Amino acid sequence: MQTHGLTRRTLLAALCLVGASLVACEKKAEERPTEPKSGATDAPAPSGTSSGKLRVGFSQIGAESDWRRANTESIKSEAEKRGIELIFADAQQKQENQIKAIRSFIQQKVDAIAFSPVVETGWEPVLKEVKEAGIPVILTDRAVDVSDPNLFVTFIGADFVEEGRRAANWVVKATGGKAMVAELQGTPGSAPAIDRKKGFEEVVKAHPEVKIIKSQSGEFTRAKGKEVMETFLKSGDGPRITVLYAHNDDMALGAIQAIEEAGKKPGVDIKIVSIDGVRAAFDAMIAGKLNCTVECNPLLGPQLFDAVEALAAKKPIEKRIVTKEGVFEQVQAAEAIKTRQY
Amino acid sequence: MASARRINPAIAALAWPLAALALLVLFNVVFTPGFFSVELRDGRLFGTPIDILNHASKVAIVAVGMTIVIATGGVDLSVGAVVAIAGAAAAMLVTRTQTPFPLVILAALGAGGVAGLCNGLLVSRLRLQPIVATLVLMVAGRGVAQLITDGLIITFEHRALSSLANAAFAFLPIPAWIAIALALATGLFARRTAAGMFVEAVGDNDRACRYAGVNDRAVKLAAYAFCGVCAGLAGLVECSYIKAADANNAGLFLELDAILAVVIGGTSLSGGRFSLAGSLAGAVLIQSLTKTLYMHDVSADVAPLPKAVAVLAVCVLQSPRVKDRIAALFNRGRA
């Protein structure tokens, strides 16, 4: 009897493990803005308090990455600079925390509520409460999925598809429209991975001599970026690769090491373009190992409070505000790194 | 003559993972051109099998510690987080201080050991269930690593530390040697002294052990501390590989791979008898499978599926009931 019990338990445990490993590959998604449906802006304007000082409630997702930290820092410092009272709440990756924070903002009668939604759905009830309270809502970095686009005033964030297009345009320009591309994708299923791939392919379609010959997920990490690049280089198509496109800088930085170990020169034998524009990418460009990084700007503070002040002054604002982003190449790296804040 | 057919159980446990590995190798011989091309470059072998060894070593190192913990009837979910802590500690020491390299290694292993001791105390003194006790550190440990690195990815240009996972000794990558040496030393210590017997006895029945005069608490404490040190070692290898400490991602889901390797290797999760060689074979099997999927451009969204199926197959084949059925089939055929 004892042995039978053990057997069943062992099998069950094994099944659980298999299940767990399946779930594990879901991993965290990165950022998530989707284009909200455009519509007229007829949201209430902030009333302004008696003291005249604007009060803004902001619910942040958490502090999961350098990018997010820079994002938070930008919002806090910009509020201080403009003399706006910021009520900041960290949701620690939980929607219920964000909903609680938003309700408390309503009770505190703030002039505007801004937040980066941790997930897309489930916001309708709380956003209706905000609307009834007459407080305008600004989304930053990620969008929400609601049937009534008037539940928020504007969405400020990056356009991942455009980032992919910019990377592809650089490849076409740098190679004269002739390239064998290896692609390191982000975490499967995450919005930046899907959109950055889509944007890149869109541009490449018009250039028959630019071919994506290898494409695999490096899960947005250095270690996986290196491991997958190692495999690319040793596959049958390895010697044909002339360009590497990585969905973020970290994977490119890992892949650079793999390229060096394979006896090739990163940035010369294989040209490399990646997305994000973190400081380490600029260091790599100065060392000549990375060719180009397409910026994904976390410094949303200025544009956020521009929008808040415009609302307070009852000026019309755009329903979709795309963050200001640049494309940096090696020649600009040494100059640009001096002003990098993240 | 039933007794004559009975094979040494340690070897029998190895049979299935090795058979699966052989099958995978065969598949690659036929369907993956260039899979086995290995060349000598800068005094080290260069090729896909070497990469597999290199990456499997990290899992294998953790799996050695995990095997011992599982043999005591426990489990350690915190190894991934401990990998992050050890890597973060090592990277900070080489970038921010002039600490001599041997001390850096000691510090990383020490950090792992302390983390393991915490787990061990929770399990042996407070009698918390191992899954719960180590879950605490699994969640908190990554936070600790983030605190150490201040939430940044710490890149280093330290020759000794970066050669740990990227250089070779006698043609093979150093992590492979570390894994082999660690498994050998652990195996010798477990089998040549009474330690291995104590571990298995505690895993089988800790109360009976205590009545027989074995200090089961001390055995468990030591097992978790050892597992922590192993995770610390893997942390050094991991951060050396990318020449940076990535507190957010280092060792992520490594605990699952390690437990899988142990289970594939034939060590029962209910404790008792363990097989270190099996765990090593399991680690190599998992990594070979991953590499094969990469080589065949299997998209990352679906890659876990074939992996899960292979693991399930090996585990099912190892279950005593299935083994009995198969044996019965053979006997009937012979009769």
Image (cartoon, grey):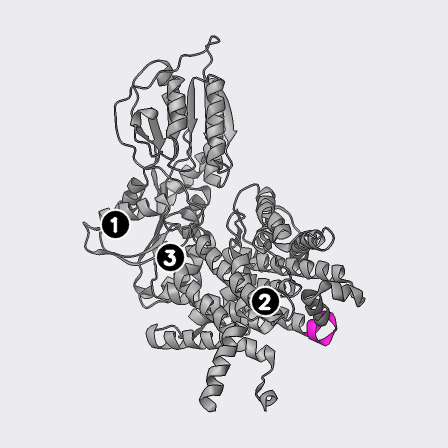
Residue B4, image x, y percentages:
59, 90
Task: Find numbered disc 1 in the image and state the secondary structure of the residue it sits on.
Answer: helix
Residue B310's image quarter?
A: bottom left
Residue at image location 47% in from the left, 77% down from the top: B19
Q: Which residue is mark 3?
A: B300
Residue B77, image x, y percentages:
58, 55
> Which label's residue is closer to the chain start, 2 or 1?
2
Q: Looking at this view, name the residue that lies furthest to the right.
A: B213
Side of B331 relative to B295 (left or right): right
Residue B301's image quarter?
A: bottom left
Residue at image location 47% in from the left, 66% down from the top: B286
Quarter containing the N terminus of chain B: bottom right
Task: Find numbered disc 2 in the image and state the secondary structure of the residue it sits on.
Answer: helix
- Front: mark 2 or 1: 2
The magenta region covers: B188-195
Pick the front one: B183 or B127: B127
Q: Amino acid at mark 1?
A: Glu
Give yes or no for contact between labels 2 and 1 (Cβ–Cβ under 8 Å): no
Q: Looking at this view, name the residue that lies furthest to the top.
A: A50
Q: Which residue is mark 2?
A: A6
Please give the label number shown on residue A201.
1
* Residue B89 visible at all: no
Q: Amino acid at mark 2?
A: Leu
Callouts 2 and 3 in the same chain: no
Side of A152 relative to B232 (left or right): left
Q: Chain of mark 2?
A: A
Residue B249, image x, y percentages:
50, 50
Q: Main secondary structure of the magenta part?
A: helix
Q: Is residue B168 magenta?
A: no
Residue B212, image x, y percentages:
79, 68
